[in-house]
Image (cartoon, grey):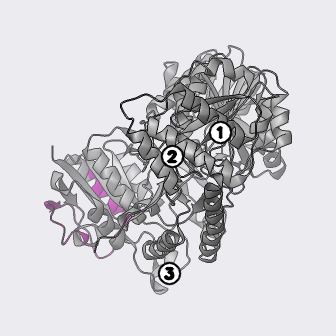
Amino acid sequence: MLRETIRLHMNEVPYPPAQSVIEAARRGLSNLNRYADPEELEGLRGLLIDYCGVSKPRVVLSPGSDLLLREVVHTFSQGRKVITVSPSFFPTAQTVEKFAVERLSLRLSPPTFDLNLELLMDALDGPSLVIIDNPNNPTGRTLLDRPGVEAILEHRNALLVIDEAYYEFSGVTFADMAEDHPQLTVIRTMDKAFSLAGARVGYAIAGEAFGSALSSFYAFLPYPSLCAAMEALRQPDYMRANVRRIVEERERLWQILDELGVRVYPSNTNFLLLKTEVPDLVSRLRDVGVLVSDVSNQLPPGFVRVTVGTPKENNTFVARYMEVR
Amino acid sequence: MRKSLGLIVNPVAGMGGSVGLKGTDGAMYQKALELGAEPSTPTRTRDLLTHLKHKDDVSLLVAPAEMGEQYIEGFVVPFVVVGEIGQETSAGDTRRIAREMVDRGIDLLVFVGGDGTARDICDAIGSRVPVVGVPAGVKVFSAAFALSARSAAEMVDAFIEGTEVTEEEVLDIDEDAFREDRLASRLYGYLLVPEARRFLQPGKTASTVSKSAVQSKQEIAGYVVEGMDLETLYLLGPGTTLRAITEAMGLAKTLLGVDALHAGKLVGRDLNERGILNLFERYEQRKIIVTPIGGNGFIFGRGSKQFTPEVIRQVGAENILVVGTRHKINQLDCLRVDTGDLELDEMLSGYIEVTVGYREGMVVEVRC
C-alpha cells in the first residue's frame, strides 16, 4: 500500500490558512492579468505596521524574505566585513559566500549552540554587516536579547540585520528598535506562522540607514499573495491559535523523542534539531514516506532537523523513526 | 562506460564492538571470537550492494570467500574472483589482493572494514586508484570512510557518474589507548576518495554546488601566502591543506611531517622536536600553521609528536594559525588540543579564528 508522504522538512505550518484567506487569494487569481495595485501594496504595508506595533518605520515588501536577505547582502556587503553565525539559514549562508568579499562566521557549538556575544563585539573592529537569524535555523535557539542588540548597535560602523522568520513562535522581536536605531533592520516572513508558504510574502522593518537603499528594491507581490496576506493580517487570532497548537505539539514531540533516548535540543521555533546515531536517517525516513531536513552540510554527522507537524503526522514520524532506526 | 570495481572485505573488522573490545588488532580477534562476537561485515557489504544504483554499469573483481565473493550471491553483477586465501584471513591478504586488483586495472576499490583495513589499503595502493571505504570497524575515525554502507553506495554511484576525487585522511588509532578511553591518533596517510558531498537539500532555493575541496584549499593557501612576511619562520603541520600552501609557493611539502619555511624557502623538512628547536636558535619570529586532523578536531593531539609542549610554548598561542576547509570545520563539534601538558592545553583553550577561505574566517571553540 502506498503511504502518504509527510512533509517535515521545510518548516511549514501543517494547517492551511483560514477559509477567508483562501477566498481572498481566489479573488486575486481572478485578476491574474494585472500587477498588484500600488494602493493595495500600501494597504498591506499599513496592516503590517499595525501588526508589528511599530509607528512609521519603512516597511519593505518582498516575494519571500530570502530575497530581502539577498538584497541586503548585495547592497551592503561591499567595503564591509560580513559577520554571520554558523550554522544559519542556508540560503543566507550561500548568498554571503557568493557575494561578500570579507567574511567571518561565529561557530555555534553543540551542545548549547550559544552565541558568544563577546566574540561578536571583538569582531566589530571596522565597517561590518552582521546578519543573525533569531531564533537560529537549524538549531532552534534564540541567540539575541535586547542588551545584546543594543551593544551591537553601539558600534556605529555596524549594520545589523536580524532574521525573525520564526518570531511568532519565539515571541522575541526587536522590530520596535528599528525606528530609533538607523543601523537595524528586522526581516520577517508570512510563510511560516501565517500558513502562507505558498504565497511567499516577506517584509523588512528597516532602519533609516537601510531604508533609503532598500527603497530601490521594489518588488511587486503576486496579486493572489497580496490579497491572501491582507486577509490573514485582518485575523491574526487564527494564526495565533495555530502557533499555540504547534508550540504545544513541539513540547509533546520533544518529550516523546527524549524518552526514546534521542538527543533533542530546546527550540523556540516550529522545528526540532535532533542528534542521532542512526546513519542516513534522512534517507531511511524518506524511504518510508517521511521527509525531514538534512543539515549535514552545516553540522557534524548525525544532526537532523524535523518540522513539528500535526499530532497525527508527528506520531507517524515517531513510529517510522522506530521502524528505521 | 562500464567501470571495473574491486571489492575487498575484512571479515573480522568490527567484531570487537559487539563484545566491548574496541578493535580486533593483535590478539584481540581471538578474544572476540571466544566472547561470541558476530561479524558485521556481511550486512554492511550487502547493504552497499543493495543501494548501488548503477549495478548495470559495473563489473566486479572480488576477493575470495568471506573476503568478498560470498556476499555477492543474489546480486546480478558480473564478477571475477581475484587472489587466494587460506583458512584464516590476514592483513597480508588485504594488501596482496588490493595490489593485484589495481594491477589488473580496476577503476575504483571498495573495501569494507575499519581504520586498520584503511591503513592496509593505504600501504598497498596509496593513491594509485580512488577508494570507497565502507565502515564496519568498532569505531571508525578515518575521514576516508563513508558515513555508512548506504552513503558508500552513493559515493560509488557518484564516481561512476564522473565526480571529482579528493584526498581524505587515514588515521592510525592506538587501540590499546582507545580501550583505556584515550583517543591517541596520528595521521597515517591519505586515500583518494570520490567527492560526494551531496546532501539532501530539498530547499526553496536551488542548492548550488559548493567549491570542491581542492578549490577551497587553494583559496586558503592563497590567502595564507599573501599574509606571510620575510622575517617569520613558519612551521607547517601535516595535512593536505598545509601542502596546498607550499604548492602555492612552488615548493614540495612532506604530507605527514612538519616542514619549515622562511622567506619563501623550505628550511626544514620532516622535522622532529630537536630539529624545530634548532631552527628556533636562528629565527626569533615563529608561527605554527596547523589543520585539524581526524573527525574529533585535534589541532594538537597526542599523536602529533613534533609539536611538543616545548615547541608550542616557544612559539606562543598568539602565533598559532589554524586553517581548514569550511566543510571540514563544519563536520566538527569544536577544535581540540591534547598535548599531554594540561596547563598548556588550558592556555590553548577558548576561541580561535580558523582561516576557511580567502578573506574568510570562522571563530571556533577550542576545548581540551
Cβ–Cβ under 8 Å for marks 1 and 2: no
Amino acid carrying mark 1 in the image: Leu
- Identify which amino acid the numbered label 2 is placed on: Asn
**Which dot marks residue A47?**
1
The tag on residue B168 is none
Do the dots labelled 1 and 2 sit on one chain? yes
Assess whether residue B150 is covered by the magenta stretch.
Answer: no
- Residue B312 image offset from top left, x and y in percent: 76, 38
User: Please, is residue A182 above or below residue B156 in the view?
Assistant: above
Residue shown at 83% from the left, 40% from the top: A148
Residues drawn in magenta: B71-99
Of tags 3 and 1, which is closer to the observer? 1
Q: Going 64% across and 52% down the picture, which residue do you hit?
A: A236
Q: Is residue A252 above or below residue A88?
A: below
Q: Which mark is residue B31?
A: 3
In the image, are marks 3 and 1 on the same chain? no
Q: Marks 3 and 2: same chain?
A: no
The numbered mark at residue A297 is 2
Tell me the crowding category of disc 2: few under 14, some 14 to 19, or many 20 or more residues within 10 angstroms, Cα based: many
Instruction: Determine the CA span between mark 3 and mark 1.
Output: 73 Å
- Hey, what amino acid is under mark 3? Lys
State whether residue B253 appears in this view.
no
Chain where mark 1 sits: A
x 35%, y 72%: residue: B43
Q: In the figure, B36 relative to A219: above or below?
A: below
Q: Nearer the viewer, mark 3 or mark 2?
A: 2
Camera-nearest residue between A11 and B329: A11
Parent chain of label 3: B
Quadrant where the N terminus of chain B sits is top left
| Label 3 – label 2 distance at C-alpha | 40 Å
